[in-house]
């Protein structure tokens, strides 16, 4: 069987089982809190919980140099990793950068890439302390970020029936930005810039992640594959279902005005918004909403039902069909 | 300027300066012991020194699937990272595996890759706790290993004039094995298997690394680029020169018998032996030699002189010319 038939998540399931059985024993498990299957791995340090995550960007798959500048690429490659630490409620500390580049890459391009990475690293006090540089026929950037969490963790496995489902910020702008860049749509300059920035320079929600922990939220994920797909990951890991109300999705206003009817689909399944999707009891959600300086929207609730299932309903509770759910590697898609 | 003109080490120098200036400040430097420029990065944990390293293998650059099985590839991808922890005198603990694969890869190939990785992980009590899986037109494996060191560290920057230079094990077998695989040489079955295994299944010297620390050795590197090149890295970071005696190099006996005159060159610049190259005062070297169960050979000494320079001499002290020094990415080579 080809990996294309198994799909990304099938492959992850398969290797997770192999690895857990073979390399997690009472000794190696000692101190380990979370292995494969969440936004980051976690283990007990002496005074705080230690976190580590790694994410890879491949030219032609995650980005093209036609739509992404080297500087934006550097920013984004680090951002997607910081976002995984944010989704655990942690504080990033160190980054390692493994960079595979063609030999005919301009030195100025590599410098621009690091400029973008450094700009974001500085904002969050992250030090780049190591990495690897090698030759390859195409650009592959793999970044590893280490961090810690002091007061608690946000995991994918902590959602329980009765929890409300909420999300930070607006959705759909990143996917709209990508669509605009590929199809060379022209909107007014402000909208164009906003959509483009959303796709090219996502902001990892590090402070909001820590705020959610302090409010008593236990379950979260960052939106990378798409709202519905990522909510599916929470439901899968927590053994629950979710029901979200289509009209409540905080579709980005610029996406609404530029993409009209398509905007809801972009918000539901576009992905790469790097907002935090989380669940919690009403009091914790209320605390988060009232202490957050940015938008938090309740979009549905966690229910008992088929593990991993996400249902979209209209304001009367009638099911709404989903055209697609989100991004999955190896599986043919028109995403 | 293209990266090919600057070379791998020129590029590393350039980005290291950028990153150090921009992301290392009094706050982020707090607790950091070693950033970019050694086998692994290191920082103070509460009860031990924490280590992290990352290394990337690219299809067509580091390996081909014609000469390497998926299982061997998994072993080797982890081995090169464990070797970096060994070269710091540390104990590896956790690994993260970022795997980019073509969609038409057989699932059984991915399973074999993990089998090879798991086999080595189990030998050293390493738990695979995370990673990333994505689609790419070619295979790229980036592994990150976390570990710790309790009693001290081996660094590239600790060599001082007067130190003896020594190396664990025999050299040249890995490069000889690669040469044999590419050119399809045929030796007797035992020699063939031994050379092949040396290249495909290197053994990270984790116990020897910790033994060196306990004997008072301070400076070490693992031999990945080649003996002369890696000694050059120690000399560069320590601001010293090195003189090694050609006749003392422990050329692997099988390489000697199969490759004759070429064997010394393979041992000097072939690389990928993943033995430990280290320096120390005579008493520390003596302690290491007498406590080690495997071969340790003194091959020269650290001297004052041009920073980073490595000189090869014969047993009468006359200079011997080096055909090539070792592996460097981006630079055209017939290596």
Image (cartoon, coloured by chain):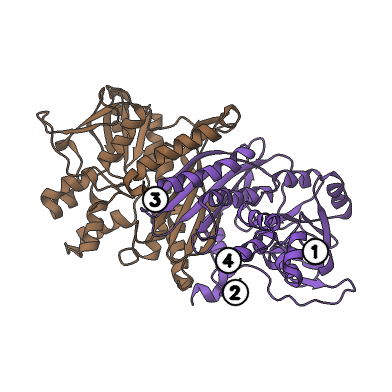
Chain colours: A purple, B brown
Classify residue A273 as left or right of residue A67. Answer: right
Residue that mark 2 sits on: A334
Task: Kindly indicate whether the residues beneath marks 1 and 4 are on one polypeptide chain.
Answer: yes
In the image, which disc is placed on residue A134? 3
Residue A33 seen anywhere in this rendered image of the structure: no
Compare residues A127 and A42 and report the one nearer the observer. A127
Q: Quadrant of residue A308?
A: bottom right
Compare residues A206 and A75 and report the one nearer the observer. A75
Residue that mark 1 sits on: A249
Q: Secondary structure at mark 4?
A: helix
Answer with mark 3 or mark 2, whichever residue precedes in sequence.
3
Chain label for disc 2: A
Classify residue B136 as left or right of residue A216. Answer: left
Q: Quadrant of residue A163?
A: bottom right
How far apart are the two marked residues, 4 and 3, measured between alpha carbons?
29 Å
Q: Secondary structure at mark 2?
A: loop
Chain label for disc 4: A
How far apart are the two marked residues, 2 and 1, measured between alpha carbons?
23 Å
Classify residue A137 as left or right of residue B260. Answer: right
- Residue B247 location, x and y as percent? 14, 37
Answer with mark 4 or mark 2, whichever residue precedes in sequence.
4
Q: Secondary structure at mark 3?
A: strand
Classify residue A240 as left or right of residue B13. Answer: right
In the image, which disc is placed on residue A240? none
Q: Are marks 3 and 1 in contact (CB under 8 Å)?
A: no
- Residue B240 location, x and y as percent? 30, 26
Chain label for disc 3: A
Query: Is residue B194 positioned above or below B159 on the image?
Result: below
Residue B166 seen anywhere in this rendered image of the structure: yes
Residue that mark 4 sits on: A182
Q: Are marks 3 and 2 in contact (CB under 8 Å)?
A: no
How far apart are the two marked residues, 3 and 1, measured between alpha carbons?
43 Å
């Amino acid at each position: 069987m080809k990996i294309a038939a198994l799909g990304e998540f099938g492959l992850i399931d398969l290797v997770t089982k192999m690895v857990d059985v073979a390399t997690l024993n009472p000794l190696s498990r000692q101190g380990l809190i979370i292995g494969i299957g969440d936004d980051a791995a976690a283990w007990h340090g002496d005074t705080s919980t230690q976190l580590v995550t790694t994410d890879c960007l491949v030219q032609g798959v995650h980005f093209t140099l036609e739509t992404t500048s080297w500087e934006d690429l550097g920013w984004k490659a680090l951002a997607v990793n910081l976002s995984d630490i944010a989704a655990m409620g942690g504080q990033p500390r160190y980054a390692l950068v493994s960079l595979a580049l063609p030999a005919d890459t301009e030195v100025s391009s590599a410098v621009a890439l690091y400029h973008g990475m450094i700009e974001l690293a500085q904002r969050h006090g992250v030090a780049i302390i190591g990495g690897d540089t090698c030759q390859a026929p195409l650009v592959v950037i793999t970044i590893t970020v280490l961090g810690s969490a002091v007061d608690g963790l946000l995991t994918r496995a902590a959602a329980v029936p009765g929890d409300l489902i909420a999300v930070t910020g607006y959705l759909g702008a990143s996917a709209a930005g990508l669509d605009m860049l590929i199809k060379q749509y022209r909107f007014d300059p402000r909208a164009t810039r906003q959509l483009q920035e959303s796709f090219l320079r996502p902001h990892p929600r590090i402070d909001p992640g820590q705020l959610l922990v302090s409010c008593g939220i236990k379950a979260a994920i960052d939106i990378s594959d798409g709202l519905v797909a990522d909510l599916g990951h929470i439901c899968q890991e927590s053994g629950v279902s979710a029901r979200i109300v289509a009209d409540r999705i905080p579709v980005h206003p610029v996406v609404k005005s530029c993409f009209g009817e398509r905007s809801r689909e972009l918000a539901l399944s576009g992905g790469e918004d790097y907002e935090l999707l989380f669940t919690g009891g009403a009091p914790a959600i209320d605390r988060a909403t009232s202490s957050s300086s940015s938008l938090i929207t309740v979009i549905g609730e966690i229910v008992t039902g088929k593990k991993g299932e996400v249902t979209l309903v209209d304001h009367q509770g009638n099911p709404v069909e989903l055209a697609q759910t989100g991004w999955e590697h190896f599986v043919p898609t028109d995403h």
